[in-house]
Amino acid sequence: MKLFIIYGAGCQGIALMRLLKKNPDSADVLCFVDSNPTKQGLIVEGLPVYPPGYLLSLDDGPPTVAVAVGGHYQEVRKLLERLGLEEDQHFYDATPRPLHYSDLEPDFAPLRDKVRRHTLVSEDRLAPLYQLSRQARKVNGDLAEIGVYRGGTALLMAEALQGSIQQLHLFDTFCGMPDSDPAIDMHRSGDFADTSVKAVSALLGEYKNVQLHPGLFPETLPEHWSYKVFSLVHVDVDIYASALACCQFFYPRLSPGGVMIFDDYGFPSCPGVRQAVDEYCGNHDLQVLYLQGGQALLQRS
Ligand SMILES: C[S@@+](CC[C@H](N)C(=O)[O-])C[C@H]1O[C@@H](n2cnc3c(N)ncnc32)[C@H](O)[C@@H]1O
């Protein structure tokens, strides 16, 4: 049986203690340790709470210290290192965390691994995009992505659409960022030029419902699209003029339940995207739904 001391006698520490005690044959908890003097000396859930110095008073050294202090882990790590303890050998961050999306949806992890080397988008943003692409199957209309670069997020969307008759329309210059506004944007003309129509066509060639629209958006919009509707639009364009053009064309064409998702809304490197979305939403009385990973959603009711 493994013995633990829990660092943190607050709600996170108590939750950890209850989790560990669920398997009494494999784990036991000796006591709590806490830096907060008002907790030291208390009995919490039947266990004493000691100050950090207690860890040095044990003859054989402390058992594994499971730290459950949420966002304060870095402070506690420094304190424990000052006491001569080593991370991973003597202590570790054991704060109970919410599940990852890949724990809930077994199809996601292999897909994430498949697209990872073709995309700039991190896992925490790929997961919402995948879920919205799956949900789009139940909403009327095609899907579109503006800002394809090497095709990673497009590949994720194409995979999520497998077997559907919905089309996935991909818009990009496929030869680098167009002109931007230096007073607003941080990206410059020619960024992301290391891609091509040929490379992206090769990556997505097996998906028969994918169509490429190379060139400068919105000039590349097909003429017969005035009455077209969309279930999901992924906007990953990084700059003001492109993001505004996406709002103006696609938002009015979303089906009920349809969504626009902006990859870069919360990124300091893409201030023009937030400015464009906020401006459009302000003018049309729309509410932005912000996701902590940096994305923002607009949903059509
Ligand atoms: C950050 S990259 C897209 C990343 C991609 N989604 C991924 O999975 O890595 C931004 C892309 O937006 C494209 N872009 C921005 N504004 C555009 C416009 N008005 N027309 C066409 N492409 C545009 C750029 O060419 C660039 O490839």
Image (spheres, rainbow, N blue to C red):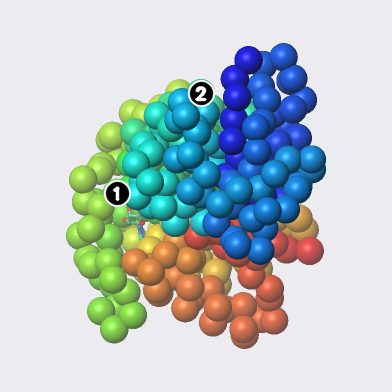
Question: What residue did someone put label 2 on?
Answer: 110
Query: Residue 173 lies in what quarter of the image?
Result: bottom left
Identify the residue shown where x is 62% and y is 85%.
Answer: 283
Indicate the secondary structure of the residue bearing disc 2: helix
**Is residue 300 depicted above or below 286 in this figure?**
above
Cα separation between marks 1 and 2: 26 Å
> Exactly how many numbered labels are in the figure?
2
Looking at the rendered image, the disc whose residue lies closer to the viewer, 1 or 2, is: 2
* Front one among 140 and 6: 6
State whether label 1 is within 8 Å of ligand 1.
Answer: yes
| Tag 1: amino acid | Phe
State whether label 2 is within 8 Å of ligand 1.
Answer: no
Indicate the secondary structure of the residue bearing disc 1: loop
**Which percent across, then down, holds residue 251?**
62, 66
If the image is split into quadrants, where does the C terminus sit? Answer: bottom right
- Whether residue 218 is visible, yes or no, is no
Q: Is residue 150 left or right of residue 108?
A: left
If the image is split into quadrants, where does the N terminus sit? Answer: top right
**Which percent across, then down, holds residue 253?**
65, 62
Q: Residues within 10 Å of mark 1 (few under 14, many from 20)?
A: many
Q: Which mark is residue 174?
A: 1
- Whether residue 53 is visible, yes or no, is yes
**Which percent across, then down, holds residue 139?**
74, 46
Identify the residue shown where x is 27% and y is 60%.
Answer: 177
**Is residue 134 depicted above or below 205 in this figure?**
below
Identify the residue shown where x is 70% and y is 44%.
Answer: 48
Earlier-in-chain disc, 1 versus 2? 2
Q: Which mark is residue 278?
A: none
| Tag 2: amino acid | Pro
**Which percent across, then down, holds residue 293?**
52, 55
Q: Is residue 90 left or right of residue 150?
A: right
